[in-house]
Amino acid sequence: MSGERNLLDRDADVLSEAMKIRFFPFVLDTQAGATLTGVDGDELIDFTSAWAVANTGYRHPAVVTALRDQLDRALANSPISLPHGPVIELAERLRDRFDADFPTKVWFGHSGSEAGDLLSKAIPATGDGGVVVTFEGSYHGITTGAATISGHSAQAGVGSEDVVTLPFPDEYRSDRTADALVERALGAVSEAFETHDVAGLITEPLQSDGGILVPPTGFLEGLADICADNDAYFVVDEVKAGLGRTGEFFAYEHAGIQPDAIMLGKPLGSGVPISAVVGRAELVDYEPASHMMTTAGGPLPAAAGLATLDVIESEDLPARAARLGARLAAALDDLAADSPVVGDVRGRGLMQGVELVASGTDDPSHELAAQVCLHARRRGLAVFYVGMHSNVLELTPPLTISEAELDAGVDRLADAIVDAQTTALDPALLERYAGW
């Protein structure tokens, strides 16, 4: 029995299913740059960044060095009671990047879910109303509070009478023009503000887990205006799209707006668990000792955050993501033109989505997406899928990926899409790796 097969059997036996979304059989051994190497020695070009975590690539030398240096200084400290230099400096740098004209503070956690949980409490507690507006397909975390202000089908059954969930613009699945789609969506938001006592609104700048949905121009701008006109918080979830991935440092910058607060997570620590909320002091302060985790903002994650910001800035990763994103989008457009099962290609920077459909229709195909991920793994590519219909391939490679790796990854993806239409897979394998 191979090392991978043995470990997969042990994984199935001992690790909780509640912590799994699996798309193909693979057991990681090492990572470097944009390459994953399994325990049996096979290599995959990675188009996932471990769910958009590895913006700086895997094991970037500057991040590794910073972590080793910090290990020689301090490790087990809780900023709850003893502040330390790195966490203060990281907060200052994030505040400077946020660059708002109002008093701003920073909260730290371990995950985007914890950040969403904070906001689920702080928005209604400090806003002028008690209701939070969110959108269908949105994903702001998986804790109870964060799930309550989310609108993704993965959180079905979790809700609150104090949350209003509205449609998010989806150009592919609408027969309206972009302008008409924005007008309709903003009209629904305005109506919600008229009929509810709204404390704040939370949105992603482009939906990731909802299916890589890029809202038409005018949508985010309109949301910001509605919130400003009604003295409600306007909060943007940058956990997945932020820190350079879309071609700007923060994805909301494409719209030229200023949120009251943003959520950060995933890529901030380059793999070390850390999240943040950066925003208006009265919102982030919330209530003393009301939302604290013992090791959040500790020395190691703070050092990782500082090193990550250094790499993003020194290597100008936002500009790199914009350039490589245009290259990726063009290649995907060519792929779509030759495939009857690619319904749409969309995204921004190195956050691209490929919507898979039944051949010659616009009917979403979850089964095809699952097959493509399995075939891609056999071709030497790691790719996951997302979406309300579980049929959108999410392409989020490290921002440090080379052009050669990017091109090779697209070639392997194209082959996998053909394979999925021509080569049947074991139904038991599909059932085991059904994703979400």
Image (spheres, rainbow, N blue to C red):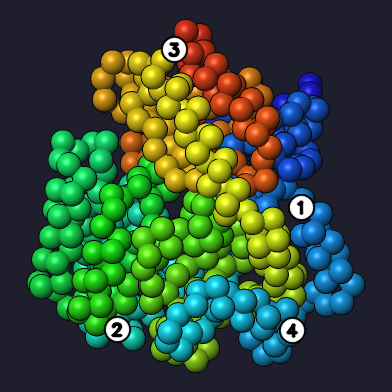
Tell me which amino acid carries mark 2: Gly
Which badge, 2 or 4, comes first in the chain's sequence? 4
Estimate the spatial distance between the alpha carbons at disc 3 and disc 4, rounded to whole Å.
55 Å
Q: Which residue was labeled with disc 1?
A: 60
In the picture, measured across the screen, residue 370 lies left or right of residue 77, that is left
User: Which label belongs to residue 85?
Assistant: 4
Q: Quadrant of residue 34?
A: top right
- Cα separation, mark 3 vs mark 1, equals 38 Å
On the rendered structure, is 428 left or right of 304?
A: left
Q: Secondary structure at mark 3?
A: helix
What is the three-letter code of the residue carrying label 1?
Answer: His
Determine which quarter of the picture holds residue 311.
Answer: bottom right
Does residue 269 appear in this view? no
| Looking at the image, residue 44 lies above or below residue 97 | above
Q: CA distance from mark 1 to mark 4?
A: 23 Å
Q: Nearer the viewer, mark 3 or mark 4?
A: 4
- The residue identified by callout 2 is 127
| The quadrant where residue 333 appears | top left
Residue 406 in percent (x, y) is at 62, 32
Residue 50 location (% of width, % of height): 61, 46
The answer to whether the residues at label 1 and label 4 have Cβ atoms under 8 Å apart is: no
Which residue is more in the foreground, 129 or 218? 218
* Residue appearing at x 51%, y 52% in the figure: 247
Q: Amino acid at mark 4?
A: Gly
Mark 3 or mark 4, which has the lower sequence index? Answer: 4
Q: What is the spatial separation of the Cα atoms under label 2 and label 1, in whole angstroms? A: 41 Å
Q: Is residue 395 above or below residue 274?
A: above
Mark 2 surroundings within 10 Å by alpha-carbon count, few (fewer than 14), some (14 through 19), many (20 or more): some
Give the spatial CA distance, label 2 vs label 4: 32 Å
Identify the residue under disc 3: 421
Measure the alpha-carbon separation of dots 2 and 3.
52 Å
